[in-house]
Structure formats: C-alpha cells, structure tokens
Image (tube, rainbow, N blue to C red):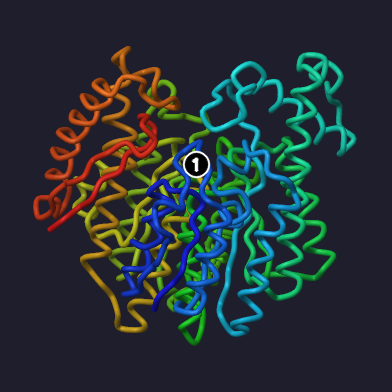
C-alpha cells in the first residue's frame, strides 16, 4: 500500500514517524520533496505543495493530509504567516479537485486549532509573543470564560496588551477559524473522511478550546458523527491517520482494550490539554480506526491488543522543569498490569503519560528489570499526553493490521519501539535533562543555538550518550545509532536513525 502524506511540518515526528508506523504493516508513505517543506519559521511552498498533491493523487492508494501544511505551508506558518483567507481557502480547495478526479480515493485530513502557548517564547509564534505571550494566552481564556458566562478578567488583560498586538492576534485567529470552518465543509460534502480537529498546547479555558467548541457545534449540527472527531493533539495525528488508512483494508476494525492501573488516573486532565486523559485515549483509538473496549468489558477475549495507560502525575511533573518526583507504587501497578496482559498472550502497547515532555525513566527501568520491556509492541512517552497516546495507538493498530494481513515486519516494529525508548526516555528524560545543567545549553530548549560550534559539541555528546543507552536496551546491541541531529537547531527535538 502506498500512502501520500502532507505532514504537519518537517520535524521527524511528523515527516518520518508515520512511515515507521506504516512499515510495521508493510506499507509505504510518500512525502513531498524537502525543498517544498518548511524549515522551522520559514514557511513551505504552499502552492508547490498543492501542485504536488494533485500530481501524487494519481499514483497513491490513499492520502493523509495536514490542512495546515496545505493552507499555510506548515504548522508554524499557520500562526505567523500574513497569507489572506482567500489564498488559504484557494489552496484547501485543491482537495476538492483531487476528490473529483478520484472519487473512490480514501482521503483523511487534520486541521489544528491555532494555539496560544502560555509562555514568552516567540520561537514558534509571532515576534510579540516574547513580550505578551502569557497575557495573550490568558486573554483567550478570559474570552472563553466570558462566552460561558463565567467570571473573567478580560478588561484587565486587554489593558495589559497594546491594541495593535491584540488586533493582530485576534485577526489571525479569525482567519484560521474561518479556514477550519471551510475544512468542516470539506467533511460535510464527503471530500475528506475523517477530518480530525485537534488542539495543540491548550487548556480547559483558552481561545483554542472555545474555537473547538464552536467547531464541535457545527459538526454536530451537520450530523457528521464519526466523520469529524475532536481531541487534544497535533504531532501524532498524521501517524494516527496512517493507521486508520491501514484499517480500511480489514473486514472489521481492530478491538483494543484499555487498562488504567492507577485508580482515578483516567479522570485527570494532563498539562497542555483540555479534557480528561481517559477521553483522549478513547478518541485517539477511535481516530486510529479501532473499536475501544473499556475496563468494564470483562469478556474481552476478542481484544486484538491492550493499551496500558500510565496515568498523568497529579503534581503535573514536566521534564522541561524540575525533575519530576518518582511514584514507586504507581510504577509497580503499571508494571504489574503490563505483565498480566503479556502473560495472557496479549499484544501490549504502553502509553506513558505520567510526565510531560519525556517518559517515566523509573517505569522503563522497572519494566527492564522484570524482563518485559522488549516484549512491548509499542511504547510512547513524548511531549504531551495526546502526542504519546496517538503514536502508541497508531503503532498498535498497524501491528493488528499486519497480523491479520500476514504482512508483519518485526524489524520495523522493533526499530520503532527502540526509537521511542531512546528518544522519549533516554533523550528527553535523561540526556537532555543532564545536559541542561550546563548554562551553555540551558537557554536553547526552545531557541536555536546561535553558535554552530556549541551546537556541534552538544550533538556529539548526545550521540555518545544515546549510543550507550541503546546498548543497554533489550536487543539494542544488534542496532547502530546513526545520523544524530537537531532538526530545529535546538535541544527540544532530536533525530537519528537505527540500523542493523
């Protein structure tokens, strides 16, 4: 199977992770040439991408589309570009032309509600974010509260932000919301199915959450049902849609049971999200094309796999802050749940959302001591809960499709498992945290290095330390780490390849 992909941006989690998921089932993902893609703040060639899409539509078996990439030239460009709504909609209309040319082609899409991060980092935002970012985030929350009839401090926040900055912020949101409404029209006319409406870096009360509410209203009014789904997430969604595309080759959806070992864990709202994590996991699984079996489904012998959720830390630990406080009892319960499912002969994936921006290293060490870490079919522990859950759901679904169609690539599955353990735990939770103790590196989590020599020293140290971690992982000695790089020239992301 050949799947054409317009990724959210050029980072590995968007550009290469979907292909790694597809490879488990023997499928291939085709992406645009690098020269058309964005380079962090430099937008991609949106018109060139529209032409690429038209050309590829004749040669692929399915399409997975980021409408942010097609409309603006990438995720950051959707927040920073000055493109008019007319130009954005004109590009999005290309999808309708593709549908007219190939009426039976599966086309799925994602549109991401514009975020308003609670920070003063302008690395991925308009320049004024460095002065007014937190205030603009709070202003969006106040507008949401006002809409709901709740107490708010809108007037005070408006007074704290210059009028021209507020106008620009709100005009960008209005343009993007109108484009999101156009995306809904593509779903309502059958041009795309499903359409995922995801919220990146949000909160229960925020500008993005309010816009999601309005979009949900129209999806409900139009009776779009499962054709439109809404949940927190962004960078994992193309992998989720690739998995859903693979499910289209089966007679029935995969059945995945959910296990949450910590009592009450699924009711917590993870940092940067706006719904309980239990809601997110079910929505992500359904978006991946799976049917969900809950804890209450005791007669789940027909389950094709089990997703174990290591629930969010009630203290909201974040690897980009202080080292999170370990929770031995919770780790013990999660290990016991994984072992119990493996002993029953289950295919098991582990969504480790205990901490934000990195996996729970104490959990991974405990799984290794128990001798079951290498038996997992999938693991994730990166960035937000939505990112982690979606990527684990996608890998599990791809494994089920592979098993049912007899196309299972065990090497591809092991490569993805090792990659996530190295990136999410060894790098994000350990190596990046250790190196951030050095002043010369600490300032470059979100901002790119300004000294190439310092960046190269950092890269070499990461290469050395990750190679050591790889050899310590189950089966890791059979693999070699190559091509370590910093995709956006900063320490937040890392990229590498694993070769045998």
Task: Give above or below for 298 relative to 71.
Answer: below
| Residue with the mark numbered 1 | 384
The residue positioned 67% from the left and 47% from the top of the image is: 113
Left or right relative to 460: residue 277:
right
Residue 192 lies, in percent from the top left, at 64, 71
Task: Give above or below for 91 relative to 99.
Answer: above
Q: Residue furthest left?
A: 477
Task: Give above or below for 135 relative to 317.
Answer: above
Label 1 CA crowd tier, 10 Å (few <14, some 14–19, many 20+): many
Residue 230 lies, in percent from the top left, at 66, 56
Task: Give above or below for 125 relative to 175.
Answer: above
Give 311 or 203, whichever is nearer the viewer: 203
Left or right relative to 257: residue 66:
right
The residue positioned 30% from the left and 43% from the top of the image is: 495
Left or right relative to 275: residue 281:
left
The residue positioned 57% from the left and 72% from the top of the image is: 107
Residue 198 lies, in percent from the top left, at 62, 51
Q: Residue furthest bottom?
A: 251
Residue 312 lies, in percent from the top left, at 50, 40
Q: Which quadrant of the figure has residue 161?
A: top right
């Amino acid at each position: 199977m050949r799947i054409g992909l317009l990724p959210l941006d050029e980072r590995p989690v968007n550009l290469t992770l979907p292909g790694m998921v597809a490879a488990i089932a023997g499928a291939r993902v085709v992406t645009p040439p690098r020269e058309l893609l964005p380079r962090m703040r430099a937008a991609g060639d949106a018109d060139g991408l529209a032409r690429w899409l038209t050309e590829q539509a004749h040669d692929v078996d399915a399409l997975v589309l980021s409408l942010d990439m097609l409309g603006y030239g990438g995720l950051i460009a959707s927040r920073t570009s000055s493109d008019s709504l007319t130009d954005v909609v004109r590009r999005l209309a290309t999808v309708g032309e593709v549908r007219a040319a190939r009426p039976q082609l599966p086309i799925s899409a994602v549109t991401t509600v514009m975020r308003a991060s609670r920070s003063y980092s302008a690395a991925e935002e308009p320049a004024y974010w460095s002065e007014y970012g937190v205030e603009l985030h709070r202003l969006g929350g106040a507008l949401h509260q006002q809409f709901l009839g709740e107490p708010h401090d809108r007037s005070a926040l408006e007074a704290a932000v210059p009028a021209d900055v507020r106008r620009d912020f709100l005009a960008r949101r209005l343009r993007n919301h109108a484009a999101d409404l156009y995306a809904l029209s593509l779903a309502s006319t059958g041009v795309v199915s499903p359409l995922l409406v995801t919220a990146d870096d949000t909160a229960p009360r925020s500008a993005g959450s309010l816009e999601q509410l309005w979009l949900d209203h129209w999806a409900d009014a139009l009776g779009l049902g499962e054709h439109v789904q809404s949940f927190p997430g962004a960078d994992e969604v193309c992998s989720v849609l690739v998995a859903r595309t693979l499910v289209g080759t089966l007679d029935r959806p995969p059945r995945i049971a959910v296990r949450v070992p910590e009592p009450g864990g699924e009711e917590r709202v993870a940092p940067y999200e706006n719904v309980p994590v239990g809601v997110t996991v079910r929505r992500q699984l359904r978006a991946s094309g799976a049917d969900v079996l809950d804890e209450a489904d005791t007669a789940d012998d027909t389950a094709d796999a089990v997703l174990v959720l290591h629930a969010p830390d009630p203290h909201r630990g974040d690897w980009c802050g202080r080292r999170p406080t370990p929770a031995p009892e919770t780790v013990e319960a999660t290990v016991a749940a994984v072992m119990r499912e493996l002993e029953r002969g289950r295919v098991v994936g582990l969504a480790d959302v205990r901490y934000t921006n990195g996996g729970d290293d104490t959990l991974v060490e405990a799984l290794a001591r128990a001798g079951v870490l290498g038996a997992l079919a999938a693991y994730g522990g990166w960035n937000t809960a939505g990112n982690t859950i979606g990527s684990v759901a996608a890998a599990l679904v791809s494994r089920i499709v592979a098993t049912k169609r007899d196309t299972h690539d065990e090497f591809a599955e092991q490569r993805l498992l090792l990659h996530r353990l190295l990136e999410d735990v060894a790098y994000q939770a350990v190596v990046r945290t250790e190196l951030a103790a050095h002043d010369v590196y600490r300032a470059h989590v979100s901002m790119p290095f300004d000294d190439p020599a310092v960046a190269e020293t950092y890269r070499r140290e990461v290469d050395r330390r990750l190679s050591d971690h790889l050899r310590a992982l189950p089966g890791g000695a059979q693999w070699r780490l190559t091509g370590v790089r910093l995709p956006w020239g900063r320490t937040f992301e890392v990229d590498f390849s694993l070769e045998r």
